[in-house]
Image (cartoon, grey):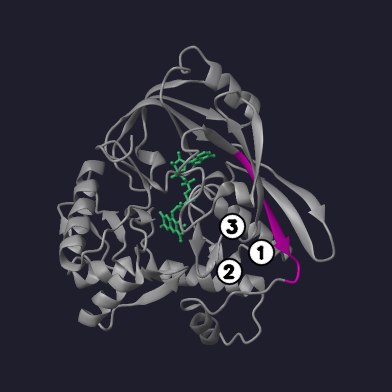
Amino acid sequence: MEIFRDFNLKPFNTFHVPARAARMARFKNVEELRALLNDPELKDLPRLVLGGGSNVLFTQDWPGVVLLNEIGGMELLLETDEAVIVRAGAGMVWHNFVSYCVDQGWGGVENLSLIPGRVGAAPMQNIGAYGVEIKEPFHHLEALRISDGQVVRFDTDACHFGYRESFFKREGKGQYIILSVAFQLNKQPKLHTHYGSIKAELDKRDIASPTIRDVSEAVIAIRRSKLPNPEVIGNAGSFFKNPLVDPATARALQAIQPQMPAWPAGGQVKLSAAWLIEQAGLKGWRDGDAGVSERHALVLVNHGSASGADLWRVARHLMVTVRQRFGVTLEVEPRVIGGGADG
Ligand SMILES: Cc1cc2nc3c(=O)[nH]c(=O)nc-3n(C[C@H](O)[C@H](O)[C@H](O)COP(=O)(O)OP(=O)(O)OC[C@H]3O[C@@H](n4cnc5c(N)ncnc54)[C@H](O)[C@@H]3O)c2cc1C
């Protein structure tokens, strides 16, 4: 396996910010991964596993090795009249996996169509969109434990999925490399069409009894109209999570801002980060080439030659402004590398 030195990461992150890795190597299976982890040139360096680079912001170069996950392949583990359990390699492009399932008539992931990135990163933050999170169709995953090189199986409970959270982002951070993910999908699925504008999009298309494919196509159309395409303008999707506050805080805020959107969320109240940013007058705001999307207040964008540090400065400006205006702390969703944010 080839080891690259002083490797250019700009094409490997969807913000398209300049960054370099001291070393970079690709792996296509667990044996190649083990060999890289034991390689004398790499074994003592800090490691960063990358899939599609669509949920990272490099604010500085990576001083260690970037391991690019290219484990492909799909396998049908079980099929009954009602359901299938299907396993996908962690390096498979997520949307290709979704499209394959839609083609087969297997329901469960259609609302997650067109999310960028690879299968292996999907459980990291329990990806979610249009009323569905990956934890629902998730069955199990296999990951390599770095400390002893063993392959370990995690079922749903062991993943500790939360809102854009999992064991792998918290307690297990940096200790496992996800190799494959298995999903349980339904042949007679219950469709989720009442979230966001899916129903309106289906109505516009005159579809009263939608199929999995109809839902997938509606989601794709909505996403294309709402979200900036990272191939055209660098971004990593939503940069902030929707904040969770206690009910008393939410009531106090709503007394001053009666139109503020808020949803009950397991004893807490979820606020709209996009609404808070927009009300703070920051939708479309920019500082040089780093800014906030004009289409979606949650999305930070690279208008051309912004660095990761420029984007991180914009992010901090948004956090400070929202905190001063509403007393609410915004939490960052992607992994921020360097700049004192993560490392
Ligand atoms: C336009 C746009 C829209 C988006 N929309 C959504 C959305 O609707 N919902 C949503 O949840 N997300 C969304 N995202 C965020 C992103 O697409 C997802 O988080 C995706 O799962 C990231 O996949 P990736 O392969 O690019 O991960 P990367 O950015 O490569 O990695 C992300 C993190 O996971 C770790 N990692 C990656 N692969 C592995 C592995 N195999 N083992 C261990 N660790 C690993 C990395 O080290 C890093 O910490 C969007 C992003 C963009 C650019």
- Could you tell me which secondary element the residue under label 2 belongs to? helix
Residue position marked by numbered label 3 in the rendering: 135
Residue 71 image point, x, y percent: 61, 37
268 vs 206: above or below:
above
Residues marked 1 and 2 touching at CB (< 8 Å): yes
Residue 279 image point, x, y percent: 21, 73
Magenta stretch, overall SS: strand
Residue position marked by numbered label 1 in the rendering: 102
Q: Is residue 39 left or right of residue 247?
A: right
Q: Earlier in the sequence, mark 3 or mark 2?
A: 3
| Residue segment shown in magenta | 179-188
Residues marked 3 and 2 touching at CB (< 8 Å): no
- Could you tell me which secondary element the residue under label 3 belongs to? loop
* Residue occupying the point 53% across, 47% down: 118
Residues marked 3 and 1 touching at CB (< 8 Å): no
Count residues near mark 3 (Cα–Cα under 10 Å), then give few for <14, some for 14-19, many for 20+.
many
Q: Which of marks 3 and 1 is nearer the N terminus?
A: 1
User: Which label is found at residue 216?
Assistant: 2
Give whichever of 277, 117 is nearer the camera: 277
Amino acid type of disc 2? Ser
Instruction: State the separation of the CA atoms marked 3 and 1.
Output: 18 Å
Assign the N terminus to one quadrant of the image: top right
